[in-house]
Image: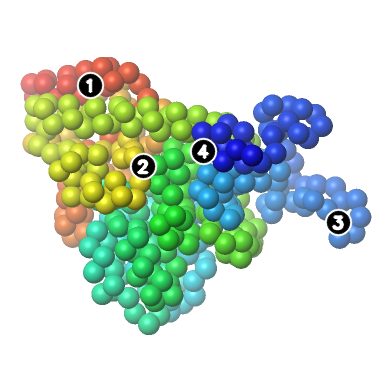
Amino acid sequence: MWNHPDSICVHGSETPAYSDGIRSLSFPIYQTASFAHDLVGHNQFNYTRQDNPTRLRLEETVAALEDGADAIAFSSGMAAIAAVFELFSPGDHIVCSEDLYGGVTRLLRNVSSKNGLLIDFVDATEPNRISEAIRSNTKAIYLETPSNPMMQIIDLRAASAIARSCGALLIVDNTFMSPVFQKPFHLGADIVVHSGTKYLSGHNDTISGFVVTSTKEMGEKIHLISKTTGGALAPFDSWLVLRGLKTLCLRMQRSQENAIALSQSLQHMPHVTRVYYPGLEDHPGHEIQKSQATGFGSMLSFRVDSRERAVHVLQHVSMIIFAESLGGTESLITYPLTQTHADVPDDTRRRLGIDETLLRLSVGIENIADLEADLRQVLEEKL
Ligand SMILES: *Cc1c(COP(=O)(O)O)cnc(C)c1O
């Protein structure tokens, strides 16, 4: 049996794809809405909203990569995260880190709050802030590390100890690291969520999401929510993610090499005033990152000296693409202020430093000299 991520990505978790009698190397796309039954009460699959072999293959692979007990594939990261919040009831209290993916902030403020969940946003880089926010009705701690877009690092072991002490679930969004660099279950998490749109599928061509659970029982609860609310990933999209996953380990390594190099060269480029990347030794979370992850990933943010320069960079890069999203083969540059984080309240944005001079870069797998030349050119140009 193989259990290294390098092999799981290529071959899945247990039985090879070609063991079905047909011997196709690529796992088949079961493009069907329903499955025939032989006998009353005896069917392997029933109806694709509930279960589908292509999606199951993907779920087993992702569960194995995260060392989880179960995984449930959704039509987007947001569908996955929304399903997790269906675990809670009106009056339940949840503590969240404040530097969150913008869509999650919107979900919590506009949808979950309306449904009676009580949410507190805290600076979770300081574990004391998490403990201080705990109440008798706290049911979960929800964290994203490294955070988006400020690349803050949260100590997951410390957060897990707090969650244990009050009987709350620790939920971690592992999108930025992927299971290649960070395994939240090894650090005490109960639930891991992913936007599969990003590194897992990796080619900027599919929207998908995952909930991975540390126990079978929690997995069953999420399966029930998925089959009931209907956000499960389609068979063809499941296949696209399976295909993207084959190169996950290679892509993570290569894009990280590029990001490390860029985080250093950017610091010496004109008009750049600050680079935020956990791989830099002066990053405040550098040591914690080294203690809980095996890499630094390929997301970085940087600051330039004026709004005009930021706008110029966005509009004049040539190979790097000015577009929302991250984690794919293509390098993308984003303006968090007007794109991903437009719905974050002003005061939170200001406190975090998400302003008109901040740019976020998702480093892809292109040639590093070409990436550096692209950025250098837009930073050197006269305005
Ligand atoms: C993109 C993203 C999400 C949302 O995922 P979608 O697939 O876009 O719905 C959630 N968390 C993080 C960290 C993300 O980057």
Residue type highlighted by circle 2: Thr
Disc 1 residue crowd, few under 14, some 14–19, many 20+, Cα 10 Å: some
Residue labelled with disc 3: 42
Residue labelled with disc 2: 294
- Name the mark nearer the viewer: 4 or 3: 4
**Residue 278 at x, y = what percent?**
24, 43
Residue 313 lies in what quarter of the image?
top left
Distance, label 3 to label 1, CA atoms, is 59 Å
Disc 3 residue crowd, few under 14, some 14–19, many 20+, Cα 10 Å: few
Residue at 11 percent of width and 20 percent of height: 381
Residue at 17 percent of width and 19 percent of height: 377
Label 2 residue SS: loop
* Tag of residue 245: none
| 4 or 1: tag closer to the N-terminus | 4
Residue 217 lies in what quarter of the image?
bottom right
Residue labelled with disc 4: 5
Q: In the rendered image, is residue 357 in sight?
A: no
| 4 or 3: tag closer to the N-terminus | 4
- Name the mark nearer the viewer: 4 or 1: 4
Q: In the rendered image, is residue 359 in sight?
A: yes
Residue labelled with disc 1: 372
**Quarter occupied by the N terminus:** top right
Distance, label 4 to label 3, CA atoms, is 34 Å
Label 1 residue SS: helix
Disc 2 residue crowd, few under 14, some 14–19, many 20+, Cα 10 Å: some
Q: Is residue 244 above or below residue 234?
A: above
Residue at 46 percent of width and 33 percent of height: 249
Residue type highlighted by circle 1: Glu
Residue type highlighted by circle 3: His
Residue nearest the viewer, comparing 1 with 377:
1
Distance, label 2 to label 3, CA atoms, is 45 Å
| 2 or 4: tag closer to the N-terminus | 4
